[in-house]
Image (spheres, rainbow, N blue to C red):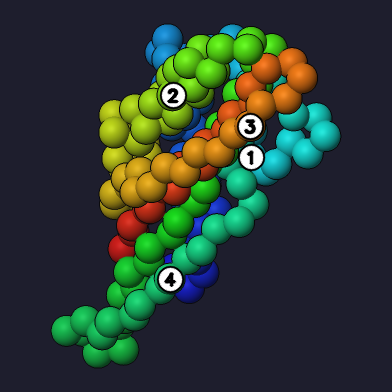
Amino acid sequence: MALTSRLKVAEDALLAAIQAQAAGGGSPPAGVALQLGSPGSGRKAEHVWIGEEATAEQSWAYTQQPNLREKAEVVELHVFVAGLRGSGDYDDVRDRLQELAAEVEEAVLTDATLGGAVFDSEVIRTDRAGGRHEKGWTMGAELTVRVTDYH
């Protein structure tokens, strides 16, 4: 029985799943940075990172064995996908951002247990924002990944 949150385990397993997707020929392809934590001022033109903000909700249940409790935990992680293009074409920037975000989703769909580290995971929400500037369009997405585990 683990007394601590599985948040770190979920975060590391999600990063490994995205890296495995990239190694298998998916995104993020060469040249697209991938990391834990915000890149801050070091953000590249195209960048994928798992944000620092996360939540973990735990519920404990008694089992049929005396003095033995089991914990269910639901963790929500936020994956940020940044796409900056010097193009004046909205469609190109939007489509590239969609490609990168889809690869994050594919990593979770391919192995919902994230390499056996958790019971289940799924992308439950995608938010997108962007704007026009002197060099073209800047656009980014935030994918919320829900991870469930029992321990």
Badge 4 marks a residue whose secondary structure is strand
Nearest to N terminus: mark 1 or mark 4: 1
Label 1 Cα crowd, 10 Å radius (few <14 / some 14-19 / many 20+): some
Spatial CA span between label 3 and label 4: 34 Å
Q: Residue at x 34, y 49 (%)?
A: 124
Q: Mark 1 points at which residue?
A: 36
Spatial CA span between label 1 and label 2: 21 Å
- Asked whether the beta carbons under mark 3 and mark 2 sit within 8 Å of each other, the answer is no
Q: Nearer the viewer, residue 146 or 119?
A: 146
Nearest to N terminus: mark 3 or mark 1: 1
In the rendered structure, which amino acid carries the disc numbered 4? Answer: Glu
Q: Mark 2 points at which residue?
A: 98
Query: Residue 71, image x and y in percent?
Result: 34, 73
- Asked whether the beta carbons under mark 1 and mark 2 sit within 8 Å of each other, the answer is no
In the rendered structure, which amino acid carries the disc numbered 2? Answer: Gln
Residue 26 shows in this picture: yes
Q: Which residue is drawn at 35% across and 43% down?
A: 123
- Asked whether the beta carbons under mark 4 and mark 2 sit within 8 Å of each other, the answer is no
Among the 4 quarters of the image, the one containing residue 105: top left
Q: Name the residue under label 3.
A: 131
- Residue 31 higher or lower than 75, as above or below: above
